[in-house]
Amino acid sequence: MSTKEVIPLKKLGEMLVNLGILTPEQLKEALEIQKQSGGKLGHILMQLNYVTEEVLLTFLGKQAGMQFISLQEFGEIPEEVLKAVPESIIRHQTLIPIEKKGKTLTIAMCDPFNIFAIDDLKVMTGYDISVVISSEKEIKETIEKYYTTKSSFDTVLKDIEQAIENVDIEVVKEKEEDQDSLSLELQSEEAPVVKIVNFILTSAVKQKASDIHIEPYEKTLRVRFRVDGVLHEQQPPPKKFQNALISRIKIMAKMDIAEHRLPQDGRIKIKLLNKEVSFRVSILPMAFGEKVVMRILDTSSLCVDLHKLGLEPETLAIFEKNIQMPFGINLVTGPTGSGKSTTLYSALTTLNHPDINISTIEDPVEFVIEGINQVHVRSEIGLTFAAGLRSFLRQDPNIILVGEIRDKETAEIAINAALTGHLVFATLHTNDAASTVTRLSNMGVEPFLSSSTIIMVIAQRLLRTICKYCKEPYEVPLEHLIPLGVKPDQVGNKQNVVLYRGKGCEHCSKGYKGRIGAYEILEMCDELRDLLLNKEPTHKIKQMARRKGMLTLRESALRKLIGGTTTVEEVMRVTTGDTDVESI
């Protein structure tokens, strides 16, 4: 809560009257309105035009011992100052760094009493933070000035023409393609929209994006790429090309270009720079057109080396031991885009030998691995996870992978497969490892079944890694890191800890390049099985797992922070919900 909210409203009003800024009558009127409709007194006074924002902020600054400045009159802000604070924080907290002197970074804020934001900035930047007050409007205008690239209609087209000139892109056509769609596609080969679509696809692949978002709004068309788990805006195509652009993508993905009311799913395979890249395409009708999201499936970027995933040595040993078990269930959990598929494919690749029969059922099959029997879920014809699993058991498998356990039926079939001598890998949507083992009980699975078959649960998230080309060290007092969960013995009891960050360069995206996993692995033991059988709550299961040596997601992330792999910003962004790091 900010100090503006903490100051009693009557006291604030009386101070304004005492300074001659308000008359007693004006204050009385404002308090009446505030009593009836609620809201902050300062906002009401500005709405009544009794005080300006500048006057109000100047007054509040005096009360807090802070200076009010006009950003319009401040002058240019150096690039190195702007890079001191991540853009995501600047936009989220509505603030802007304006000056850096020695170990002090000056921040302009419209709510300078937001102590939580100020404390976060101290930890994140390693600087002492000095706060000045500026109007919200001026701060937002300054943010747009330095962080938004505005391109004219002609500039966009010119850039696309230049960028696409030497790009060789070819749609890989399947044998069963509809001839009418092919004719329509060939007829539009020379259209500007074809160049725009090719430019978007090739740019995304070159930037190593995982997803492309094309979003229609009333007057604009926005394009964003998800790079290393974070969305970044790209140069937007002209709004007038919206319908043609969506139709072009539908043709490439073999969708119905005449259908605009219902969601559609498809797949595109292109040949780019002598390699094939697949795109999983989803179309969703929105208020101002159809939104397109394309997941990029680049097999060449798939990491299947267990030692490169980011597992800590002791965690890796547990992982390797349990995936070699002859039977049982290994569960992997995490949100969409957290690297679950990579972890599972890494495990299967490790186990993929000629003498082992491996079958997977996925929705969809993201990467094809030679030597593994992979099945794509087709719910519309009855090929569900449960139906596929039943068939697998008649196919003499050694190892089974279930893309996702979504219901009780699928869970029970997977458990029965484990009970009859099969090693099963599956995903389940929960927040951490401890809640995963109780989720099955909530789905209706008997605790004695799940406790007797589960051998390991993996919860994971992905952290962006610091670019090696622009990586730089900085010092942070230990006391600033303790609230994150860092223990003095982890840093050798030093009073100042050396951390790292990326300055940003041509090789990276704002100081980051690539991602690495943070892992929480719960290995089943007799004590945990007893807790499951007794239907104990999740927090007790987590406490027991911690006593048995389990590293939490936060602790795994902190190790990578102290090791110089990632930043404070990433630890806070990815593991905000995992703050239970006390010693057990």
Image (tube, helix red, strand yellow):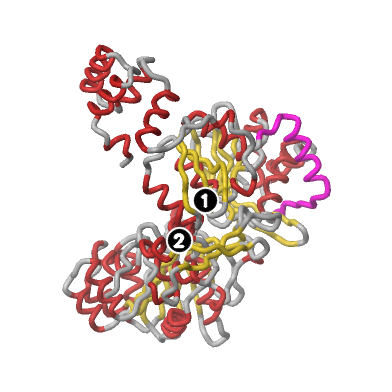
Q: Nearer the viewer, residue 203 or 368?
A: 203
Give the alpha-carbon distance from disc 1 to disc 2, as whole Å: 23 Å
The magenta region covers 150-173
Q: Nearer the viewer, residue 80 or 413?
A: 80
Q: Visible in this render: residue 437? A: yes
Q: In which quarter of the image is residue 224?
A: top right
Provide the residue designation for mark 2. 571
Q: Position of residue 513 (x, y in %)?
A: 61, 60
Instruction: Decide: is 84 above or below 258.
Output: below
Say the numbered circle drawn on residue 104. 1
Residue drawn at x 27%, y 80% is 452
Secondary structure, mark 1, is: strand
At x 51%, y 44%, the residue is 106
Within 10 Å of disc 2 (Cα), the crowding (few <14, some 14-19, many 20+) is: many
Residue at 36% of width from left, 61% of height from top? 483
Q: What SS does tag 2 mark?
A: helix
154 magenta-colored: yes
**Can you give x and y, in whole percent of width and height, for residue 262 in the image?**
49, 38
Amino acid on which the number 1 mark rests in the picture = Thr
Q: Which residue is drawn at 51% across and 81% down?
A: 357
Q: Position of residue 454 (x, y in %)?
A: 33, 77
Q: Which amino acid does label 2 sit on?
A: Val
**Which residue in the rendered view is the most extreme toward the right?**
166
Q: In this view, does 14 lie to the left or right of 516?
A: left
Examine the rendered structure and indicate whether residue 156 appears above or below residue 82.
Answer: above
Instruction: Say which label, 1 or 2, has the lower sequence index.
Output: 1
Report the side of 65 relative to 531 (left or right): right
